[in-house]
């Protein structure tokens, strides 16, 4: 049986961590390096850091904070936000990233995925997909416009990105982000049906039982934000709870 992954997902803005609800109303969530050091020590399988202003404001990603984070952790780091070309991807790698995450920059220029995979390998390219539901149908969401994108259907976009070289997919259920209403297992199942690459599901985990429910349904990788930031939970407690529920975790 494959071991399950727990991935802290942290949002970076102007040198601080923040967390919001459905991509809005962000509150301060602490110092990046200190928080990531704690997550690493408590058993995070890896850590995802997203500079949420870099793409939105077409500015240089915060590589200074990325370097500080990488200097303080012993686990792989995925960095996303504002990675629009090979030069920025290389700088992210030189600053300590192990994987590169792309989202809207890949929507704007899908060939970016091929370029990154050619240089760094597919295993180092993570496709981030923000998803909203419209009349029950999941659609790709573009946070820059605040609307669903009409460029491609969700499944067509994931298939195309994987064909171009994305080696992993991170699914964010925007409707549930920060809501603590439970993970969108049905969304994961729809994408699991069309690709064999690893999938990380994010958005809505508000209790430890939500994670158990998702993993027992087949989800093997869950990204956590609010559950770790604005609650009394930490990764030691999360891992113990999951192991107690009979779910195999990575050592």
Image (cartoon, rainbow, N blue to C red):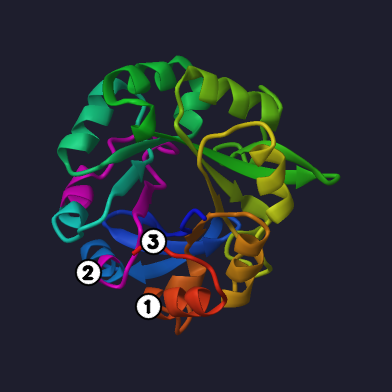
Q: How far apart are marks 1 and 3 (CA)?
A: 13 Å
Confirm or deny contact between disc 2 and disc 3 (CB under 8 A). no
Q: Distance between the residues labelled 1 and 2?
A: 16 Å
Confirm or deny contact between disc 1 and disc 2 (CB under 8 A). no
Query: Which mark is on residue 236?
Result: 1
Q: Is residue 62 above or below residue 149?
A: below
The stretch of residues the image draws in magenta is 40-67
Does the rendering let one see residue 207? no
- Classed neighbour count for the residue bearing mark 2: other residues with Cα under 10 Å, few (<14), some (14–19), many (≥20): few
Q: In this view, does 98 lie to the left or right of 196?
A: left
In-front residue for pair 85/124: 124
Query: Which mark is on residue 2?
Result: none
Q: What element carries label 2?
A: helix
Residue carrying label 2: 34
Residue 17 image offset from top left, x and y in percent: 34, 62
Which of the marked residues, 1 or 2, is nearer the chain's N terminus? 2
């Amino acid at each position: 049986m494959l071991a399950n992954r727990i991935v802290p997902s942290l949002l970076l803005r102007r040198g601080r961590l923040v967390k919001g609800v459905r991509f809005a109303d962000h509150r301060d969530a602490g110092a990046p390096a200190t928080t990531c050091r704690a997550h690493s020590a408590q058993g995070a399988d890896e850590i995802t850091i997203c500079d949420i202003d870099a793409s939105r404001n077409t500015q240089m990603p915060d590589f200074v904070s990325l370097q500080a984070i990488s200097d303080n952790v012993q686990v792989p780091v995925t960095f996303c936000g504002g990675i629009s070309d090979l030069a920025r991807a290389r700088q992210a790698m030189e600053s300590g990233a192990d994987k590169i995450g792309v989202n809207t920059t890949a929507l704007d220029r899908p060939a970016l995925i091929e370029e990154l995979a050619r240089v760094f390998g597919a295993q180092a390219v993570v496709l981030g997909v923000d998803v909203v539901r419209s009349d029950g149908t999941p659609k790709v969401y573009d946070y820059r416009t605040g609307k669903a994108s009409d460029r491609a259907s969700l499944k067509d976009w994931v298939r195309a990105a994987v064909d171009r070289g994305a080696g992993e997919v991170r699914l964010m259920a925007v409707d549930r982000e920060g809501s603590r209403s439970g993970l969108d297992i049905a969304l994961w199942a729809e994408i699991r049906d069309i690709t064999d690459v690893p999938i990380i599901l994010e958005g809505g985990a508000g209790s430890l039982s939500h994670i158990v429910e998702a993993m027992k349904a087949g989800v093997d990788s869950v990204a956590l934000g609010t559950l770790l930031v604005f609650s009394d939970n930490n990764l030691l407690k999360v891992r113990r709870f999951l192991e107690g529920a009979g779910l195999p975790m990575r050592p």
